[in-house]
Image (cartoon, helix red, strand yellow):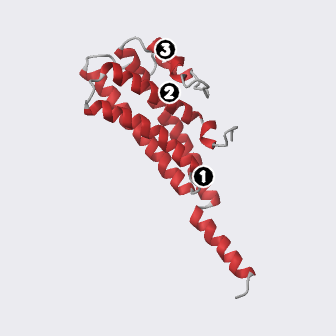
Amino acid sequence: MNKSGFGYESLVVYWIACSIYDVTVLFTKQHIPYGSRTRDQMDQAARSGKQNIVEGSLEISTESNLKLTGVARASFGELLEDAKDYLRQHNLPLWDKNDPRVWQIRKTIDLPYKSYTSYMTYKTYMNNPENICNLLVTLCYKEMYLLSKLLAAQQQKFVKEGGFRENLFKKRQQYKNTVSF
């Protein structure tokens, strides 16, 4: 845990999610008409992904944490498809995974930020819709990969330690065995 005591703030997936949300809001403000359902959906998918990471990490139940991490991953999958749709519908190229720009984005580490401007790490990609949209695509792929790894670790923890209800029941049984009625 960090100084604030919230475990999610120590997760790389949280900081990437912050960047994705900020970049998405900038992109939709600049390139998707106000009042458009697509704009709302993209903003909400990015927000949902970030917020579900927070909510899941604050859960006591490993099962709930697993579920909410899965929801976060699905939200970023939805955002990924919207970004790819935008590129296709505007005749803009989707960068290949071996493109040097993609490699540069993938290598960038999203660190905790103090001034809430982590997305500015990617300012060189903010100059046109092709760049910013491909930045979103690359960040979503990176985030979904890392969330898959987090899900696998959470599943392992659940297998080894059991779930919240299961452990609570064991404690109840232990208590009943030590107290005579």
How far apart are labels 1 and 2 at the CA level? 28 Å
User: For this view, does 178 lie left or right of residue 29?
Assistant: right
Residue at the bottom extreme of this rendering: 181
Q: Residue at x 62, y 53 (%)?
A: 157
Residue 74, image quadrant: top left
Q: Earlier in the sequence, mark 1 or mark 2?
A: 2
Q: Residues within 10 Å of mark 1 (few under 14, many from 20)?
A: few
Residue 124 x %, y %: 48, 11
Residue 25 x %, y %: 40, 26
How far apart are labels 1 and 3 at the CA level? 38 Å
Q: Residues within 10 Å of mark 2 (few under 14, many from 20)?
A: many
Nearest to viewer (mark 1 / mark 2): 2
Q: Residue at x 26, y 34 (%)?
A: 37
Label ID, residue 167: none
Residue labelled with disc 2: 19
Q: Amino acid at mark 1?
A: Gln
